Image (cartoon, coloured by chain):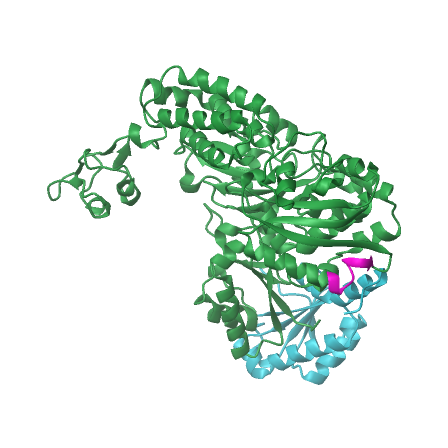
Chain colours: A cyan, B green
């Protein structure tokens, strides 16, 4: 290992930023993949793998990927919800790896909702 | 570092390790592999999380879900439900005492809510065995700042302005100590990290070294830069194997990265650290004894002055600070003296780490702002007394400290308030006692410890503490006499006056403080031959209340002396000649029929 210079500390910290954002639970974007039995059967695991792959290849650091149970709309699985800080969550349905890549590029990185794949904007009401 | 979607922050502090966290780790890795999740979910071992009572504990990030009391059998279900299907498992969450619903998030649990982490800033967020994790949390930035943009005077000024005081016990202003050492001429100055934590029930220093060794090293490096030292020692107990292992690993990582050794960070600054393992004598916590031990001499204190700042290790100017003090330094340099001095009270700035133990529900390692009240410590963080018994006292400062009684529960914790109350801050041990604790017995326990640990150099400490121990033992044994109390007070003062170091100087504190607040208990032992808390065996008798006894015979089975007899389906009785007062019958009785008088 080469001896560090002060600027190398910043470089290492930058590399660790994604890890630390995850551990501190802070992020600009939160993506939730629905992982009920229906979701998994329809291919939700591939969706998660694709997302992690997208994240690996991109330079964005502040994205958190999490999973949740069945979204309740089993016929439209795999589904995921993308939520940018301060904006309403957007639900995407009938996903494939290619669709996820486009959503990642346009919505997660670019901040623009991909209307072609979106089911609805907002969460269900709970009483 | 590889991208995962989830990090399982599994506590691998000594407490959780002894409860099996490495077995949990193996089970998690096995199960994650079986579910093909090993590329998505990472298992990270961290230092002490603090909530030792509930160990093994694990926090799931990014959600912040807190799991506790984990067993290997829980793991397959947990992996499938939560880590695969995203449904947190409520069964494994923490349910606060007196509440029905489990609390999923760590930040919502009372034990954690009132804490403020400065020394423990990386707790549960880093793997202490990975230097990249420490750097990822801003580690070694303070060192870079101290080496590139600050002068020695700037650093000392910053520490002085922050109001940081020594966390090892005496509370001497850290900046002033550094200034005194820096002012000495000549080279070959030394830095020492005092990790000889000897108080019964205290584990702050061990936990800091185990969970964040680089924080301690960075603090020492900054101190070395400030006073102009080129070598440092970490004096740590041999009985802390995990802390030693992680410290040595941290040292070798820091050397590889050029953060220790020659030309640190390319700035031309040289400093290295060696580890000295102590054999575990309480007196080695005293700085001049510690120096003796470092040099290979018997650990006996010597007269000060000269202070170590003038003549310390091998006669060279030496700056000794405790583990927690060193770990706090980088954060002060990073965030500034003003930030630090806003936390705490007028005379005691910042935060303090305590090991909260004894009869509270939530035992563990906590860091709180100075000025927090004892009540908040015991009830909000500690969750109240076990079995909802009555609170009696809290013992702070270990064997050198004293007991603070219930009427002073609203006392804010800082150096001066604790001293006024007859105790000391000490290094941060905090032992909570309930109504079933006998204060005379507590004083006897600490005297016994100190009698063993006295180095023997000063007659007042060596002989005086022993006589005090004999007197208090006599009181516990029902042989106390009227004259014992004034004699104890007089002896206590003599031991304080006639001892050279703080061990003897504070040894009478447990007796004097219990005499101050619990004199009636001493008097009950002496005059009425009665132990009000029902602890001192010579003064108590166990009886079975015939009104309450349901003749279930559980006590009969539990009695090792076969001292409990009686007819079938009739209340039982205890034969006093056979009874050894072990209390086994009372522990098993479901009807509170066994009473102690």
Check the image and report above or below for B428 versus B499.
Answer: below
Q: Quadrant of the N terminus of chain B?
A: bottom right
Residue at 83% of width from left, 50% of height from top?
Answer: B146
* Residue that extends furthest to the left in the rendered view of this protein: B567
Q: Can you say whether B481 is above or below B197 in the image?
A: above
The answer to which quarter of the image holds residue B168 is top right
Measured along the vertical axis of the image, is residue B524 above or below residue B214? Answer: above
**B570 vs A13, nearest the viewer:** A13
Q: Answer yes or no: is residue A85 visible.
A: no
- Residue B285 coordinates in the image, percent (x, y): 60, 40
B181 or A35, nearer to the observer: B181
- Residue B140, relative to residue A43: is it above or below? above
Q: Is residue B344 left or right of residue B58?
A: right
Would you identify the image quadrant in which residue B533 lies?
Answer: top left
Whether residue B97 is in magenta: the answer is no
Looking at the rendered structure, the number of numbered marks drawn on it comes to: 0
Residue B586 position in % (x across, y down): 28, 40
Q: Is residue B259 magenta?
A: yes
Give coordinates of residue B2: x percent, y percent.
Answer: 69, 73
In which quadrant of the rendered image does the C terminus of chain B lie? top left
Query: In the rendering, at what x and y percent does residue B527 appear?
Result: 34, 17
Residue sitting at 81 percent across and 72 percent down? A110
Range shown magenta: B255-264
Q: Between residue B299 and residue A106, name the one nearer to us.
A: B299
Q: Is residue A54 visible?
A: yes
Left or right: residue B194 compared with residue B582: right
> Left or right: where does residue B233 sit relative to residue B83?
right
Residue B185 in the figure: left or right of residue B546: right
């Amino acid at each position: 290992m080469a001896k560090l210079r002060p600027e190398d500390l910043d470089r290492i910290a930058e590399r660790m930023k994604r890890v630390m954002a995850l551990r501190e639970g802070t992020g600009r974007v939160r993506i939730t993949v629905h992982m009920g039995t229906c979701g998994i059967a329809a291919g939700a695991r591939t969706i998660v793998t694709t997302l992690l792959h997208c994240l690996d290849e991109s330079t964005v650091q502040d994205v958190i990927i999490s999973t949740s149970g069945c979204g309740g709309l089993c016929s439209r699985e795999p589904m995921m919800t993308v939520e940018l800080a301060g904006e309403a969550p957007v639900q995407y349905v009938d996903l494939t790896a290619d669709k996820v890549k486009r959503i990642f590029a346009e919505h997660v990185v670019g901040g623009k909702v991909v209307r072609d794949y979106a089911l609805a904007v907002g969460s269900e009401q709970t009483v | 570092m590889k991208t995962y979607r989830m990090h399982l922050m599994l506590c691998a502090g000594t407490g959780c390790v002894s409860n099996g966290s490495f077995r949990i780790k193996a089970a998690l890795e096995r199960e994650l592999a079986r579910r093909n999740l090993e590329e998505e979910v990472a298992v990270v071992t961290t230092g002490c999380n603090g909530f030792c009572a509930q160990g093994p504990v694990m926090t799931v990030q990014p959600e912040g879900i807190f799991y506790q009391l984990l067993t290997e059998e829980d793991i397959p279900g947990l992996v499938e439900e939560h880590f695969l299907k995203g449904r947190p498992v409520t069964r494994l969450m923490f349910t606060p005492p007196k509440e029905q619903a489990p609390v999923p998030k760590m930040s919502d649990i009372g034990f954690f809510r009132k804490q403020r982490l400065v020394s423990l800033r990386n707790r549960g967020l880093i793997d202490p065995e990975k230097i990249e994790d420490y750097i990822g949390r801003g580690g070694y930035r303070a060192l870079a700042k101290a080496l590139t943009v600050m002068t020695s005077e700037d650093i000392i000024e910053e520490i002085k302005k922050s109001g940081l005081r020594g966390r090892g016990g005496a509370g001497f202003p850290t900046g002033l100590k550094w200034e005194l050492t820096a002012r000495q001429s000549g080279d070959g100055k030394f830095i020492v990290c005092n990790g000889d934590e000897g108080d019964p029930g205290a584990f702050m220093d061990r936990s800091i070294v185990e969970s964040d060794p680089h924080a301690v090293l960075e603090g020492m490096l900054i101190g070395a830069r400030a006073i102009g030292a080129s070598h440092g020692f970490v004096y740590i107990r041999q009985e802390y194997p995990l802390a030693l292992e992680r410290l040595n690993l941290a040292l070798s990582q820091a050397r590889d990265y050029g953060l220790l050794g020659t030309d640190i960070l390319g700035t031309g600054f040289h400093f290295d650290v060696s580890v000295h393992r102590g054999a575990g004598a309480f007196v080695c916590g005293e700085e001049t004894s510690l120096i003796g031990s470092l040099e290979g001499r018997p650990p006996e204190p010597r007269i000060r002055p000269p202070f170590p700042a003038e003549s310390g290790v091998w006669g060279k100017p030496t700056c000794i600070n405790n583990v927690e003090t060193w770990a706090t330094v980088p954060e002060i340099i990073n965030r500034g003296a003003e930030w630090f001095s806003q936390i705490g009270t007028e005379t005691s700035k910042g935060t303090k780490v305590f090991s909260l133990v004894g009869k509270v529900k939530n035992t563990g390692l906590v860091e709180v702002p100075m000025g927090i009240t004892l009540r908040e410590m015991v009830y909000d963080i500690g969750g109240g007394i076990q079995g909802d018994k009555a609170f009696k006292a809290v013992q702070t400062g270990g064997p050198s400290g004293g007991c603070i009684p219930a009427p002073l529960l609203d006392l804010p914790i800082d150096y001066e308030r604790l001293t006024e109350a007859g105790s000391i801050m000490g290094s941060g041990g905090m032992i909570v006692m309930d109504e079933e604790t006998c204060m005379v017995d507590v004083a006897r326990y600490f005297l016994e410890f100190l009698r063993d640990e006295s180095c023997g150099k000063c007659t007042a400490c060596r002989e005086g503490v022993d006589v005090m121990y004999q007197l208090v033992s006599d009181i516990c044994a029902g042989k106390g006499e009227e004259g014992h109390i004034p004699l104890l007070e007089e002896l206590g003062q003599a031991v304080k006056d006639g001892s050279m170091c703080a061990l003897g100087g504070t040894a009478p504190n447990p007796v004097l403080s219990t005499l101050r607040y619990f004199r009636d208990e001493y008097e009950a032992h002496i005059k009425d031959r009665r132990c009000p808390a029902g602890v001192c065996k010579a003064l108590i008798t166990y009886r079975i209340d015939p009104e309450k006894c349901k003749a279930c015979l559980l006590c009969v089975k539990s009695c090792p002396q076969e001292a409990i007899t009686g007819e079938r389906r009739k209340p039982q009785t205890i034969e006093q000649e056979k009874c050894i007062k072990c209390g086994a019958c009372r522990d098993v009785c479901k009807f509170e029929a066994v009473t102690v008088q």
